[in-house]
Image (tube, helix red, strand yellow):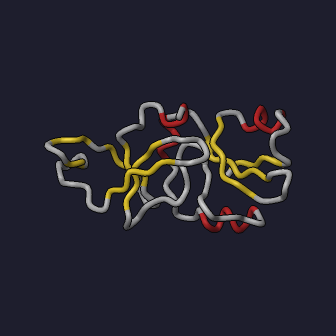
């Protein structure tokens, strides 16, 4: 969960992200309005917990980038799928969004502060900035 330190009370949506507070048994946005359709999620790959919504929710883990039950056979498929996704919250973490190709040939989303360093590990076949 190291990538989400300081973002524990943030709701991640495709079009935006926002901070929440917990008051009197409900989660509220900055305007004090109750967050509708809130989903408390957990990534089974990295075990990070995060919030999204049922209406405009993200379909990947904001900690490790894992998509549940989705496979991308090309970088273009992945980047097309991510069009319109607000990743500006990464600015608070010092990380950047990357597309990485596994040695099996599929493409994944990853977050890392130093793309060249990640590439040097040999963990992925190729590493590209999003």
Front residue of 47/84: it is 47
Report the residue that reaches farthest toward the left.
24
Residue at screen point 47% across, 44% down: 89
- Rendering coords of residue 4 (x, y %): 49, 36
Q: 27 left or right of 106?
A: left
Residue at screen point 56% across, 33% down: 94
Q: Is residue 46 above or below residue 68?
A: above
Q: 40 left or right of 58?
A: left
Report the residue that reaches farthest toward the front.
44
Front residue of 76/107: it is 107
Q: Is residue 130 above or below residue 121?
A: below
Q: Is residue 121 above or below residue 109?
A: above
Residue at screen point 77% across, 66% down: 73
- Rendering coords of residue 11 (x, y %): 38, 49
- Rendering coords of residue 51 (x, y %): 40, 49
- Rendering coords of residue 103 (x, y %): 85, 51
Q: 76 left or right of 9?
A: right
Q: How many marks?
A: 0
Residue at screen point 65% across, 34% down: 113
- Please tell me in which quadrant of the rendered image residue 21 appears: top left
């Amino acid at each position: 969960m190291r990538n989400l330190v300081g973002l524990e009370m943030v709701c991640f949506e495709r079009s935006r992200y926002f901070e929440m507070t917990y008051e009197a048994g409900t989660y509220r946005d900055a305007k004090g309005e109750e967050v509708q359709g809130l989903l408390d999620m957990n990534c089974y790959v990295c075990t990070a917990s995060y919030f999204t919504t049922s209406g405009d929710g993200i379909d990947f883990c904001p900690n490790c980038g894992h998509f549940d039950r989705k496979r991308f056979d090309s970088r273009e498929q992945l980047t097309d799928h991510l069009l319109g996704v607000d990743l500006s919250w990464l600015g608070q973490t010092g990380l950047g969004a990357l597309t990485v190709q596994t040695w099996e040939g599929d493409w994944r989303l990853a977050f890392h502060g130093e793309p060249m360093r990640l590439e040097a590990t040999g963990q992925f076949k190729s590493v590209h900035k999003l």
